[in-house]
């Protein structure tokens, strides 16, 4: 049996980008025997994802094998063990766990370690303590907040990156943070910039049937694909969002969708409450949590508006207008601002406060289609070249 290539990432939970990224990287590794590793063994194939294997068990089996391990995108450099373990729990259990452990750092770390079977503070970053003979690659990872992470976590991550054979990051903020500690890295767009090129036919097939096709029939004049995470769920914020959306979009339909159902991601109740604040004739709540349905919804829209970074990246790949909206509690620039500051075309809005949504969305929708197409082609080309530079050495041995 051939030696496997391990793809490691947060694709063990339902989050749009984390479901999509391993598909893109796997498409660049034809003929390889691939193992999809997360922090837990899960089967997300019903949602279009992968069956994942728990990293602790994969390391126990392959820790001394000369193989390749690829960290697949995502904001993994700042994901702490406590938060990672919580996001893998049933949503009904999270509040009680937070109430019991959040103010007890030692106990919550012990619980996270026992839950994950790993000692690390940054469990999605694997170093040589787990895979002693592996070629370690980071393919378009993010760490926009790494400079502000707890010192112990930051030290662990930087030491693991020093051990890596190749590091590719997806934004200039992460690149600068690593440069400050003398870690060489390559800058490349998020791998999901290749989604239209690599999965166009799959997405077109999903657009032609089921709920996506029904949305197209409901709004023949076009619609906006709109998404907000649970951080936008208070009444005052929803009131502002509804007022801004009602003013924007030239009368286009508004389709509200979830970009993730894992804890702390998107809340269907939040979307339902927002829908009740909008004209019933103009709004629909999209129920599907299937990866390719969500891609098809965005690809077929007249534009994307929301908090999801990968909602924006998929819209960019399909040359659609896009706009991110800042959560009310955002206190410092995050991964969306880091990414748009690195890759968005001049003149297109990045992330705006809620009360600026209507004006910024009108600006985004006015973007010339040829410019949107040029940006999509350019980013796909840069992503392909950057990933090709990182991945050639991943041939099975």
Image (tube, rainbow, N blue to C red):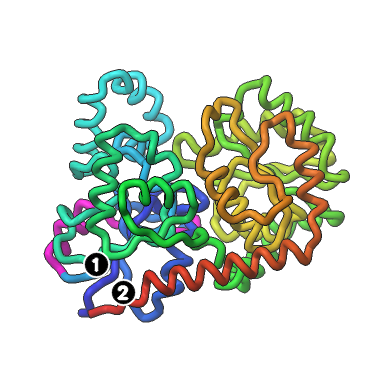
Provide the residue designation for mark 1. 135
Q: Do residues under tags 1 and 2 come within 8 Å of each other at their CB atoms?
A: yes
Q: Is mark 2 on a helix, strand or loop?
A: helix
Along the viewing direction, whichever of 30 and 95 lies nearer the viewer? 30
Residue density around tag 2, few if under 14, some if 14–19, many if 20 or more, within 10 Å: some
Is the residue 308 above or below the residue 320 in the image? above
Does residue 344 appear left or right of residue 395 in this picture?
right
Residue 380 bears which disc, if any? none
Range drawn in magenta: 47-65
Quarter occupied by the N terminus: bottom left
Kindly identify the residue that appears in the image at 52 percent across and 31 percent down: 332
In primary-sequence order, the first of circles 1 and 2 is 1
Residue 225 screen position, x and y as percent: 70, 48
Kindly identify the residue that appears in the image at 54 percent across and 50 percent down: 339
Residue density around tag 1, few if under 14, some if 14–19, many if 20 or more, within 10 Å: many
Q: What element carries label 1?
A: strand
Can residue 48 be found in the magenta stretch?
A: yes
Let me know if residue 272 appears in the view: yes
Residue 397 screen position, x and y as percent: 22, 80
Along the viewing direction, whichever of 323 and 65 lies nearer the viewer? 323
> How far apart in space, not on screen, are marks 1 and 2 (Cα)?
8 Å
Provide the residue designation for mark 2. 394
Residue 33 screen position, x and y as percent: 31, 74
Query: In the rendered image, which quarter is residue 201 located in?
Result: bottom right
Kindly identify the residue that appears in the image at 44 percent across and 69 percent down: 387
Can residue 43 be found in the magenta stretch?
A: no
Residue 354 screen position, x and y as percent: 69, 31
């Amino acid at each position: 049996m051939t030696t496997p290539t391990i793809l490691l990432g947060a694709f063990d939970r339902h989050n749009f980008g984390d479901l999509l990224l391993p598909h893109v990287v796997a498409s660049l590794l034809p003929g390889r025997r691939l193992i999809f590793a997360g922090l837990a063994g899960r089967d997300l194939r019903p949602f279009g994802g992968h069956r994942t294997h728990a990293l602790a068990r994969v390391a126990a089996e392959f820790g001394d094998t000369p193989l390749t391990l690829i960290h697949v995108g995502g904001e993994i450099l700042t994901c702490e063990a406590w938060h990672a373990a919580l996001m893998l729990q049933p949503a009904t259990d999270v509040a009680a766990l937070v109430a019991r452990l959040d103010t007890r750092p030692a106990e919550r770390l012990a619980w996270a370690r026992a839950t994950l079977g790993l000692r690390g503070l940054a469990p999605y970053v694997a170093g040589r303590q787990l895979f002693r003979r592996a070629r370690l690659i980071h393919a378009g990872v993010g760490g926009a907040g790494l400079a502000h992470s707890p010192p112990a976590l930051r030290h662990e991550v930087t030491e693991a990156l020093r051990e890596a054979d190749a590091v590719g990051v997806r934004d200039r903020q992460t690149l600068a943070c690593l440069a400050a500690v003398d870690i060489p890295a390559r800058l490349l767009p998020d791998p999901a910039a290749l989604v239209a090129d690599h999965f166009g036919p799959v997405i077109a097939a999903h657009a032609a049937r089921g709920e996506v096709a029904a949305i197209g029939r409901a709004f023949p004049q076009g619609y906006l694909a709109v998404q907000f995470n649970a951080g936008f769920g208070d009444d005052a914020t929803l009131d502002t969002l509804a007022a801004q959306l009602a003013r924007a979009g030239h009368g286009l339909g508004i389709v509200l969708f979830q970009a993730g159902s894992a804890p702390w991601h998107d809340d269907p109740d939040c979307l339902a409450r927002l829908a009740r604040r909008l004209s019933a004739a103009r709004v629909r709540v999209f129920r599907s949590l299937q990866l390719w349905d969500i891609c098809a919804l965005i690809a077929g829209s007249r534009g994307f508006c929301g908090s999801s970074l990968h909602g924006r990246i998929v819209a960019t790949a399909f040359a659609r207008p896009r706009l991110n909206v800042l959560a009310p509690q955002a206190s410092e620039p995050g991964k969306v601002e880091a990414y748009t500051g690195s890759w968005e075309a001049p003149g297109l809005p990045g992330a705006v406060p809620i009360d600026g949504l209507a004006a910024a969305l009108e600006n985004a929708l006015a973007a010339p289609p040829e410019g949107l197409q040029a940006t999509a082609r350019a980013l796909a080309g840069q992503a392909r070249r950057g990933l090709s530079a990182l991945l050639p050495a991943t041939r099975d041995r």
